[in-house]
Each structure stands twice: as C-alpha cells, then as structure tokens.
Amino acid sequence: MAHLRIGSRGSQLALWQANHISHLLQQRGHTVSIDVIKTTGDKIADVTLAKVGTKGMFTKEIEEALAEGRVDLAVHSLKDLPTELPSGFVIAAIPEREDARDAFFSVHYSRLEELPSGARVGTSSLRRQAQLHAVRADLNIVPLRGNVDTRLRKLESGEFAAIILAAAGVTRLGVAKAIREYFDLDQMCPAAGQGALAIEARSHDSQTIEAVKFLDHPQTRAAVECERAALNALGGGCQVPIGAYAEVNGRELLLRAVVASPDGKQVIRDRRSGSDPRKLGMEAGLELLTRGARQILESVYGTEASVPQQP
C-alpha cells in the first residue's frame, strides 16, 4: 500500500477532517501523514470574508503544494472549493455528507424569534446575514471570524446574544450539544457544499485517485454537483449571498436555491426537481438571474462582479 501525504489547513476543524480521512485510509492499509499548510484565508483572519472575496482563499496554497508534489491529496471543506478547479486537479472523492443545516447558538435564548430587537448576532457569512435580515430586520448582524472554539468563547463571554454556525462543524468537533436550534432549510438555505468534504488530487495521479475512490458517496456527489452548478451559473464563490441545497428524492434531486440582498429586503428563491445534477443546478441559477439575482449580485460586488451573461 502507498504512503499518502494529506495537505490540510491548520484549524481545529480542518485537522479533524484530515485526521478523519487519514484514519479511513489507514484502515485500508495505507500509511498517512498530514502536512499543515497556511492559506490566504488563515493569514487575514481579522478581515471580514465578504470584503476579501478572493476565490480559493482557503485552497490556493494547498493546491500549490499538490501541484509541486509535496502532498498527494488535499482535504477541503467542499464549500471552500471554487466551482471551477484549476487545470490539473480533480475532486477524487466526496464522502457522505454531514448535516448541512445552519444552527443557532445562544447562552440566554433558545430560538431566533426570542432575541430582543437590536440583539447582536455574529456570523462570518453574507448568505446568513441576508437570510437572517429577511426574517428579523431588527437584529444587529456583526462580523465574526475565528475557529469554532473562538466563536463559542466570544458568545459565552457576552460579546454576542447569539451566533450562527454550520451544524456540520460543531458536530464533527463534538460540541453539537451547544446547538439551541437548527434552521429550517427554507428559512436559511445552506451554502453550496456545506457539510461535505472534498478530496482533491492531481488529475494524472491514478494511484492516489484509485486509493481514495472508496470514500466517494454517489448521492452526496450528485447533490453537491447540483449545488455547485447553481453557484457557478450565478458566478459566485463561497463568500456570496447565495444558498443552494440539493437532496436525493427517490430517483430525482430536489434543489433549493436562494439569492438575497445583504439587508434581506430582496430574497429570490427557486425550488425544482430533476434527474441531471448539473442541468438542474444550471437551470436554477439562470432562473434566479432572470428574476433579479443579477442586480443583487452586481449591487453587492459592483459591476465587475463575476456574473455571467445570459446565453
């Protein structure tokens, strides 16, 4: 069996993910090492993600190590991976997804609707901010960066009345007991790929691709391919006010997609079913563009925003 070198970010959650994949590979007889790589996103931890807006900010340096042969595979949170990979790379496996929903955390309040007017709510995501404002325009949404532990400590210290995090991350880190409420998918549509992992490899490295093939979960792959197709049609990266969530429903996929203005005053939703993941996602994205998503995205990012022309 091969010795496999995994490239990973150094956060607590990223290392959990890398070690999880390492354990599964070791069970198959491989020896595995983990190389921690600092990414652009890690280096600018004091800047709001939406203001940075750089595609690949959590993956670029890891892909450079992959291209140079310093690591054999990379383990990413799939939502951090740009919808179009650079030439020479492939998503070799997408393991079964964890809970994709967003979750509400608070010391004093059990549900979002219990928060008093003007309450400080922390989130790092424009997507969450926009959908929160659509439900509670009276809340004070404040940028929140840092790893899961850091964010929970800020909540416990009283800096925030509540914070919003992805359920998958806190579940993986064993602190799901801190969740007070899970958001309904129609109220808070997750980010494309949220809760899923991506195992990235060099496209010509057939040995590594074969070694990780057993990790691939076809239903999860179909769902996230659909979500990423919708995101791609909208020209968005991971730091945009766009949500997309697909789930297998019999022989078809059911896709929910949303584009919202940061103030929550404009929320455009689409819900549709189909059997072809990429076609379904593309159709949803183009439909949202025709119904006003283009204007929302251009107003958020300016006329230079990567919003594609209609075919």
Image (cartoon, helix red, strand yellow):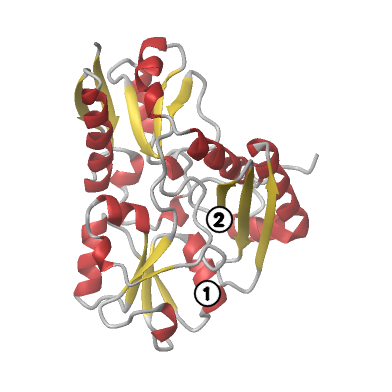
Percent x, y for residue 5?
25, 21
Residue located 55% across and 55% down the image: 243
- For the image, the number of numbered tags is 2
CA neighbours of label 1 inside 10 A, class few (<14), some (14 to 19), many (20+): many
Local secondary structure at mark 2: strand
The residue that mark 2 highlights is: 243
User: In the displayed structure, does residue 237 sit left or right of residue 107?
Assistant: right
- Quadrant occupied by the C terminus: top right
* Residue ranking furthest to the front: 250
Q: In which quarter of the image is residue 261?
A: bottom right
Task: Please say whether residue 156 is visible from this viewpoint.
Answer: yes
The numbered mark at residue 237 is none
Rounded to the nearest angstrom, the CA distance separating label 1 from label 2 is 15 Å
Percent x, y for residue 127?
51, 60
Amino acid type, mark 1: His
Local secondary structure at mark 1: helix
Task: Please say whether residue 65 is visible from this viewpoint.
Answer: no
Residue located 67% across and 52% down the image: 303
Q: Which of 54 and 222 is in front in this view?
A: 222
User: In the displayed structure, does residue 229 sit left or right of residue 216?
Assistant: right
Viewer-side label of 1, 2 = 2
The answer to whether the residue labelled 1 contacts the one labelled 2, judged by CB atoms less than 8 Å apart, is no
Percent x, y for residue 101?
44, 58
The numbered mark at residue 133 is 1
Residue located 23% across and 78% down the image: 158
Q: In this view, does 145 lie above or below 7?
A: below
Q: Is residue 100 above or below residue 17?
A: below
Q: Quadrant of residue 94?
A: top left
